[in-house]
Image: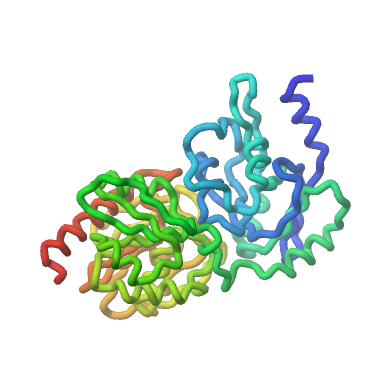
């Protein structure tokens, strides 16, 4: 029996994912044989599963892939966006096979290596519609060989603390920091709340040398680097759980150019006095339409977040620059006086379109203007 048929036989390892509201979806297990809890969210991207798996912003979550086929191409290429997989598990409809005869690593093998569980054969359309209707859900993924009733799994999902009020950014931030690029005209400190590698590549492409520093870095330690700008990265979970970070960002305001994305956008908003609240099911995927209110252009964007800035809570000296055309939530802000702006989406994509990469050039121009005294 060849490996492909051996894999088909393994589909007898039945599994299910139970949501806290009582809904249960059945399939078969792959990857690590370990039950776990997580928050179930859906991702509408049609490709780029390796980048999605390695996005630290998914820490603590189960990603439900809405695209039917996942795993058709191998995982043994350089598409990782972080040093490991931080999400808790994945849910797919059809798990595809790649041939080991071509020295390719299957998604099943990759998940095994990362010690992460998966479930396939799930009606992901039905699960996605459920999450859209009822919101992101605490969930329990049962993949072990041991017996467990649906009621027991639902109870475990309900009992889990969830992600609200939880600091997961500290769990994914590299505690050591590192130098990403040693050459460049401008020196940038990138604060790592769960930073993706393609962000660093895009900053480096703007003639920037980058020092990546961990989430707990103080204002004093940042300023000791004498940076030309500070970048506030993406990251997971609840920004309201990070007062020590957004209070530090408040110290940076007006003293140095700031750019933020995703969690960095929310933290900048909190530093400016705005409120940040949880969305019903969040934005996850690489096909979200965003309107740039400054130019009128519509960008197709890559997104991964569960929280958004409350527009009504923004102070008068901050303007909204971008809005989501699906639900009119805030997708970008900038300060009218200080050199600081941020967006809620991922301009570096990976995966996703390149419509928003101009924002890295805008960061560079902001730095040049600040050094030239226009913001003094």
Residue 96: quadrant of the picture = top right
Left or right of 260 on screen, residue 27: right
Image position of 233 with respect to 248: above or below: above
Left or right of 361 on screen, residue 238: right
Residue drawn 41% across and 73% down? 246
- Judge by depth and name the residue closer to the eye, 65 or 224: 224
Image position of 110 with respect to 200: above or below: above
- Give the residue furthest to the right: 147
Left or right of 172 on screen, residue 92: right
- Judge by depth and name the residue closer to the eye, 368 or 228: 228
Residue 123 in percent (x, y) is at 70, 46
Q: Quadrant of the N terminus?
A: top right
Q: Quadrant of the C terminus?
A: bottom left
- Judge by depth and name the residue closer to the eye, 217 or 23: 217
Residue 24 in percent (x, y) is at 76, 56
Residue drawn 31% across and 68% down? 320
Residue drawn 64% across and 64% down? 134
Residue 261 appears in the rendering? no
Residue drawn 26% across and 61% down? 227
Residue 62: quadrant of the picture = bottom right
Residue 271 in percent (x, y) is at 37, 75
- Which scheme is used to colour this image of the protein? rainbow
Q: How many marks?
A: 0
Residue 129 in percent (x, y) is at 63, 55
Residue 204 appears in the rendering? yes
């Amino acid at each position: 029996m060849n490996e492909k048929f051996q894999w088909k036989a393994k589909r007898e390892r039945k599994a299910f994912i139970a949501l806290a509201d009582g809904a249960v979806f059945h399939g078969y297990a792959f990857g690590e044989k370990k039950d776990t809890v997580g928050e179930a969210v859906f991702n509408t991207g049609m490709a780029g599963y390796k980048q999605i798996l390695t996005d630290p912003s998914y820490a603590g979550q189960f990603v439900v892939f809405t695209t039917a086929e996942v795993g058709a191409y191998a995982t043994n290429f350089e598409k990782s966006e972080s040093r490991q997989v931080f999400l808790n598990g994945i849910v797919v409809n059809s798990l595809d096979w790649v041939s080991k005869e071509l020295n390719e690593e299957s998604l099943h093998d990759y998940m095994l290596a990362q010690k992460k569980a998966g479930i396939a054969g799930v009606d992901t359309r039905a699960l996605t519609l459920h999450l859209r209707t009822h919101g992101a859900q605490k969930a329990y993924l049962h993949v072990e060989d041991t017996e467990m009733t649906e009621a027991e799994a639902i109870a475990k999902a309900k009992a889990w603390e969830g992600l609200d009020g939880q600091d997961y950014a500290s769990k994914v931030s590299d505690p050591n920091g590192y130098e990403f690029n040693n050459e460049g005209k401008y020196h940038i400190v990138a604060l790592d709340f769960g930073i993706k590698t393609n962000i660093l590549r895009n900053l480096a492409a703007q003639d920037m040398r980058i020092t990546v520093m961990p989430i707990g870095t103080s204002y004093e330690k940042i300023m000791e680097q004498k940076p030309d700008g500070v970048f506030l990265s993406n990251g997971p979970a609840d920004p309201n759980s990070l007062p020590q970070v957004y209070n530090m960002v408040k110290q940076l305001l007006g003293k140095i150019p700031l750019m933020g994305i995703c969690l960095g956008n929310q933290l900048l908003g909190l530093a400016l006095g705005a409120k940040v609240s949880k969305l019903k099911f969040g934005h996850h995927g690489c096909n979200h339409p965003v309107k740039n209110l400054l130019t009128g252009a519509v960008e197709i964007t890559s997104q991964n977040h569960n929280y958004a800035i409350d527009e009504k809570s923004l102070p008068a000296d901050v303007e909204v620059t971008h809005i989501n055309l699906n639900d009119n939530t805030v997708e970008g802000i900038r300060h009218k006086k200080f050199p600081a702006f941020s967006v809620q989406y991922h301009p570096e994509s990976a995966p996703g379109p390149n419509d928003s990469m101009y924002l890295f050039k805008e960061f560079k121009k902001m730095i040049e203007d600040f050094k030239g005294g226009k913001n003094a």
